[in-house]
Amino acid sequence: TCAFAGQKKVLAAYEEAVKCGYSGARAGRLHTPHGVFDTPMFMPVGTQATVKAVSPRELKEMGAQIILSNTYHLYLRPGTELVAEAGGLHRFMDWDGGILTDSGGFQVFSLGPLRKITEEGAAFRSHIDGSTQFLSPEIAIKAQMNLGADIIMAFDECIPYPAEYQYAKLSTERTTRWAERSQKAHTRSGQALFAIVQGGMYQDLRRVSANDLVSLDFPGYGIGGLSVGEPKPVMYEMLEQTVPLLPENKPRYLMGVGTPDCLVEAVRYGIDMFDCVFPTRVARNGTAMTKSGRLVVKNAAYAKDFLPIDENCGCYACQNFSRAYIRHLLKADEIFGLRLTTIHNLYFLLDFTKKMRQAILEDRFLSFREEFLAQYCK
Ligand SMILES: CCCSCc1cc(N)cc2c(=O)[nH]c(N)nc12
Ligand SMILES: [Zn+2]
């Protein structure tokens, strides 16, 4: 077990990672106040304190361990003090597994009409009522302490893509100063604060960001500023530059990723944790994820297809319903249709990360990766 002695605020201890042959693929266990969880792991996104269309009981049944929520959204509505009064986010949404909250920076830049970024923080207009709002490292950390997640994120700027080198440099340096302010503002014991590596698509800035944040000694590290429209090879190159600089005995979380091909490549570089809205978002427009790629179950081709989405899938949708039935529900705008595609897509990614873990433990990850990519990318 990796020593976390002295990390008085940290409960996300990282058990000895089991390494697998090539590079950094590893299987680990993440300790939190709400349980010990297996990595690599996919974390379903529950932006507004619910993973859209599925219940906490269904999430537990499909093997979800940690789910995500967004400080930006909950800060604007219903307010993080209200959630604290309700007993915290776990109680509020009746979820007894792990919770990770994002710090709000990304959502400010991607959602609200941005007003201004200064050294102090980010001024923006609420996407809900247009009111003028402001987030800083101190406000974001206080909000996350109110929510009471097991893992919280430092306040950062997700650098847009593409970005000029000079802008990326100044922004990355500011994110490091914001990480230090986040650390000083974080006073809630039993809660782990992760820093977020930035640097745009510049190798040297990625290395500087990683080294500076590692020297501030966080219990875990998010890798941000990726999956923002860059080509996949560029994302992989940034991982290659960044991951080896992060401590082996601490969790690495690739933010906002993604599709199964990206997950298997990122695990190869040594990533442990993933989140992405993709599986739940595409489910809502009738697209199912399979090991051979996407299946648009809404298409006419499946009108009389009485097979399940995936005959080898153990999810509630595939065990009980046909493509024809799910297509019928989607065409009829029946909510149950979206629930079934969402259940399948979440199960698919949760099961995929479980299969990657097993492959690593059995020291056959590379052949698992080859076989998967051969089928998925065909
Ligand atoms: C619930 C959503 C969590 S991940 C959101 C996200 C996604 C992506 N792609 C990048 C970033 C980033 O750079 N910083 C932060 N805070 N968040 C990011
Ligand atoms: Zn299924």
Image: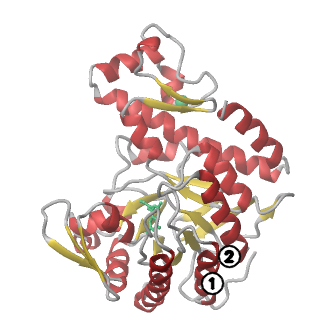
Name the secondary structure under disc 1: helix
The disc at residue 246 is 2
The disc at residue 304 is none
Residue at image point 63% right, 69% down: 251
Picture quarter with the C terminus: top right
| Amino acid type for the residue under numbered disc 2 | Leu
130 over 95 or under it: above or below:
below
Q: Is residue 93 found left or right of 258 in the rendered image? A: left
Decide which of 188, 363 is in the foreground and name it.
Answer: 363
Name the secondary structure under disc 2: loop
The disc at residue 214 is 1
Q: Picture coordinates of residue 311 (x, y %)?
A: 61, 21
Label 2 beta carbon less than 8 Å to ligand 1 = no
Q: CA distance from mark 1 to mark 2?
A: 7 Å
Asked if the residues shown at circle 1 and circle 2 are in contact, with their CB atoms under 8 angstroms apart, the answer is: yes
Decide which of 16, 370 is in the foreground and name it.
Answer: 370
Residue at image point 80% right, 53% down: 361
| Amino acid type for the residue under numbered disc 1 | Val
Which quadrant holds residue 104?
A: bottom left
Picture quarter with the N terminus: bottom right
Q: Picture coordinates of residue 28 (x, y %)?
A: 71, 63
